[in-house]
Image (spheres, rainbow, N blue to C red):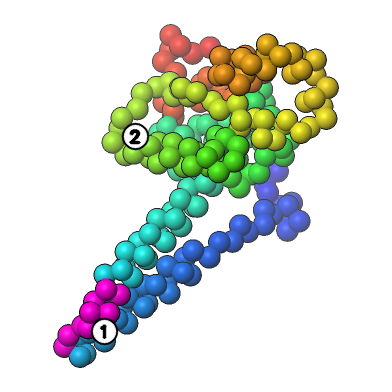
Amino acid sequence: MNEADLGPLFELPADPHYLWIAGTVVTVLAISVLVVGLVRGRLTRALLMAALLLPATAYGIGYLFMLEESKSVEFCGSCHVTMSPLVAALDEDTESLASIHWQRGAVSHTDACYRCHSGYGIWGDVAAKRAGIMHMVRTVTGNYEFPIEAKHFNVDSCLGCHVQAVGFREVEEHLDREIQEELLSGESSCAGDCHEVAHPETALWGVAGPPLEEAP
């Protein structure tokens, strides 16, 4: 069913952030300083510093705004050739780990990609944003190849939500010290080892799909 037909109760709430307001204020201040300088025919040292620093500050705020926007699922899916099949599979697939979480509402539909690919804590957020920037760079430069492969999936991304869950703690395998050490060391992973793969194999080949000899 089309989400628009479900009614306002099922609409995702807005995720407001006000960096754009700060950026606009700083930009207006910068323009005002320059106008004063043009009218007076010169800029005092203080105004000159302001004219230099305010645009740089506005650029920095704009950059932060872009980083926040890049956390959305819609943004991730905008990389048509590479990422759009992965986002589409969230609704279409029923067996991969990502689609199971998505369809059960276990992860936010606003920033699901970011949440699952960022580790726990502030450094997990930093690593996820750094990886996202590199994804954009590789997409723009064409420096990628299929199938898309995650070199390492941080188990903290799973534990950040599941480690406190009663059901998780009741599973006998999760209490095994050897298994815990393998997970924490990166020797094994939740996705693909004990549980279903994170994304369907066909989606990792981009919009063109797998070559005939690779097709299931």
Query: Which is nearer the N-term, disc 1 or disc 2?
Result: 1
Residue at image location 37% in from the left, 66% down from the top: 58
Q: Which residue is mark 1?
A: 35
Which residue position is annotated with label 2? 138
Q: Secondary structure at mark 1?
A: helix
Q: Nearer the viewer, residue 65 or 122?
A: 122
Q: Callout 1, which amino acid?
A: Val
Q: Position of residue 191 (x, y in %)?
A: 61, 21
Determine the CA span between mark 1 and mark 2. Answer: 41 Å
What is the crowding at mark 1: few (fewer than 14 residues within 10 Å), some, or many (at least 20)?
Answer: few
**44 shown above or below 174:** below
Residue extending furthest toward the top: 213
Tell me the kind of residue under disc 2: Arg
> Is residue 108 something one can see in this rendering?
yes
x, y percent for residue 40? 20, 90
Residue 107, quarter of picture: top right
Residues rendered magenta in the picture: 41-50
Q: Nearer the viewer, mark 1 or mark 2?
A: 1
Q: Residues within 10 Å of mark 2 (few under 14, many from 20)?
A: few
Q: Residue 67 magenta-drawn?
A: no
Q: Position of residue 109 (x, y in %)?
A: 63, 44
Figure quadrant of residue 55: bottom left
Q: Is residue 77 visible?
A: no
Identify which residue, 30 or 214, lies in the foreground: 30
